[in-house]
Image: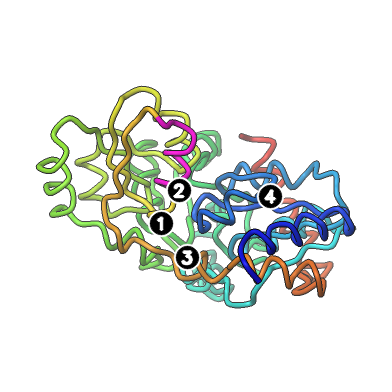
Amino acid sequence: MKMEELVREIERLKEERNAIIMAHNYQLPEIQDIADFLGDSLELARKAVDVDADVIVFAGVDFMAETAKILNPEKTVLLPTSRATCAMANMLKVEHILEAKEKYPDAPVVLYVNTTAEAKAYADVTVTSANALKIVEKLDSDVILFGPDKNLAHYVAKQTGKKVIPVPENGHCYVHRKFTVEDVERARRLYPNAKLMVHPECEPEVQERADVIVSTGGMIRRAPEWDEWVVFTEREMVYRLQKLYPDIKFHPARDDAMCIGMKAITLNHIYESLRDMKYKVEVPAEVAEKARRAIERMLEMS
């Protein structure tokens, strides 16, 4: 089926199923183009609370689809392919949280939304890269257990002055770990008039050399402040930014900064997902109830 046909069929099935497509900023351009709602993890979580549809097709990775299901237990949430998973989310196991709690029993457990539903069930509150700083500042504790991204933990610790303990020790996003000081130096050399916007999942030495450290949602908000940027996050973010701001120049810091889990979803997967109502996301009720408390607390605090 040609792309135009696929898009027409997707639109027809959306109407038939009373469905909407939610997509993350890292999705392929053609999926961003057909999405009803595009955003970062926080924006998608907020939007999932008040979706007016029977079916949510989630063009993102599995933990995001789980979050949508947790917030919408009565709706059908579809993940277009089971290959859309997040390596970082899978690094944090429940055992890691329990071991950390034994060492620091009074420390609140703050988990990045990039975690499985099972892990979220053990969180006091979840956060995203957009609101982690604000939420940790509000918590009445100087010691925080934070999982699973150690670079975001470093950023939060530096900004708040609190002791932020990464759980596990080496949780990371392999895409953001690719960015190096050499990439920063090359960007400064190639684009002398550009400013650097860097995601807080990047390594500390890259963060230190940035002009701004922001989530993908923050990148969208801050972009109008300057007329040329080098973007240190997943490469498809440049497509989103360029479409929003055609008069501003955006350059990817690396062309190979690509999330395999996000790119696992194609237009054909979206079409088949709507056609066959697959793959349905299910979260056990007990897990969902505990995880929902942590997610709702995040939404209230941010």
Q: Nearer the viewer, residue 42 or 204?
A: 42
Q: Main secondary structure of the magenta part?
A: helix
Q: Cα distance, mark 2 to mark 4?
A: 20 Å
Is 41 contained in the magenta span?
A: no
Residue 221's place in the image compared with 112, above or below, is above
Q: Residue at x 64, y 74 (%)?
A: 81
Q: Secondary structure at mark 2?
A: strand
Q: Quadrant of the C terminus?
A: top right
> Which mark's residue is nearer the viewer, 4 or 1?
4
> Which mark's residue is nearer the viewer, 3 or 4?
4
x and y percentages locating residue 296 in the rendered image: 72, 45
Residue 151's place in the image compared with 47, above or below, is below
Residue that badge 1 annotates? 165
Q: Cα distance, mark 2 to mark 3?
A: 12 Å
Residue that badge 2 annotates? 143
Residue that badge 4 annotates? 295
Mark sitting on residue 103: 3
Q: Give the magenta part as a residue range.
A: 237-246
Q: Would you say the residues marked 2 and 1 are in contact, meaning their CB atoms lie under 8 Å apart? A: yes
x and y percentages locating residue 199 in the rendered image: 37, 46
Q: Cα distance, mark 2 to mark 1?
A: 7 Å
Is 242 contained in the magenta span?
A: yes
